[in-house]
Amino acid sequence: FISMNENPPAIDDLLFEDNLNVQAMMLNVTSSMNIRDVKFKNYNYENNLDENNLVNLDSWQIGGVITIKEFKFSDIKNARCIIMTQNKYQANIQSCEFTNINIGTGIECLTGSGIYCILNGNMTIDGCIFTNVECFNDGAAISAEVQAVEIKNCKFFKCYTTNERATSSGRGGAIYMNAEFSETEEVLENNYFEDCTAPTMGGAVYITGRDVERSNLLEDDYGKYNVRITKCNFTRCKSSQVGGAISSGQYDNYGGYAYEDNDLQGQEERDDEENL
């Protein structure tokens, strides 16, 4: 825990290992801050509780922008790595690695083993690598609301969800994005997905779109609430129901159709190998 009114200290090249029951880090500083090369290893919580978060940015106080760079999370069980739900400052997550992360099944509503950013979070995720990340419910690597996060230049290997009980969960093997409250176009750009799977919908990416009724038939809302996926690569991603790589909307097991008025646009995606 660091709290100070002066210029913040330089923090880099640290190792946190086998430290349980408390947050790994907490900062209270009055200016922008860069932190780099911090490693979190072998965190194995016995119980899967919602407060098990290694880096809870909601509890940090930053007087500017926080840049988290080259963090490495490995062998983490029953805890999220990074969480943000409040817009108190801008958070940049750059060139971080998440390896062998499993949030577990103790609380079935938990999503996002690697990064969880919802509500009023304000986060950019750039150049990160997620490998063998598992979650029971939605979005193993990243679970987010589109207005809270920007995801670009990231790689996802063997990220998967496991909940087979209902179509309303186990979605988005790598990324789950909720666009129900989006106000502007959001973009997923230059991301790579390999061997990502989901038992229900969206082997790599699942997006819940925004339903908006037009005030009149002449109103043009094309692209206003759009989620645009551009310059992404999907290799050997699959789901058991619909959308081996990408799924948007809800799938009705009985009627066999997708619904919700989603504005989803694909551009220059590349399927190098079959996505089932």
Image (spheres, grey):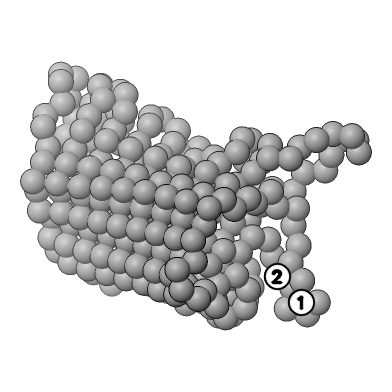
Of residues 178 and 16, which is closer to you in this image? Answer: 178
Q: Residue type at mark 2?
A: Tyr
Q: In the figure, 11 relative to 65: above or below?
A: below
Q: In the figure, 47 relative to 4: above or below?
A: below
Residue wearing tag 2: 251
Relative to 243, is 69 on the left or the right?
left
Q: In the figure, 209 relative to 111: above or below?
A: above
- Earlier-in-chain disc, 2 versus 1: 2
Q: Which residue is drawn at 41% across and 46% down?
A: 152
Give the quadrant of the N terminus. Answer: top left
Of residues 101 and 256, which is closer to you in this image? Answer: 256
Give the quadrant of the C terminus. Answer: bottom right
Relative to 141, is 252 on the left or the right?
right
Q: Where is residue 25 in the image (x, y as percent from the top left)?
A: 21, 45
Q: How far apart are marks 2 and 1 (CA)?
A: 7 Å
Residue wearing tag 1: 256
Of residues 105 and 275, which is closer to you in this image? Answer: 275
Relative to 273, is 250 on the left or the right?
right
Q: Residue at x 22, y 42 (%)?
A: 69
Q: Are marks 2 and 1 in contact (CB under 8 Å)?
A: yes
Numbered disc 2: secondary structure: strand
Q: Position of residue 53 (x, y in %)?
A: 32, 54
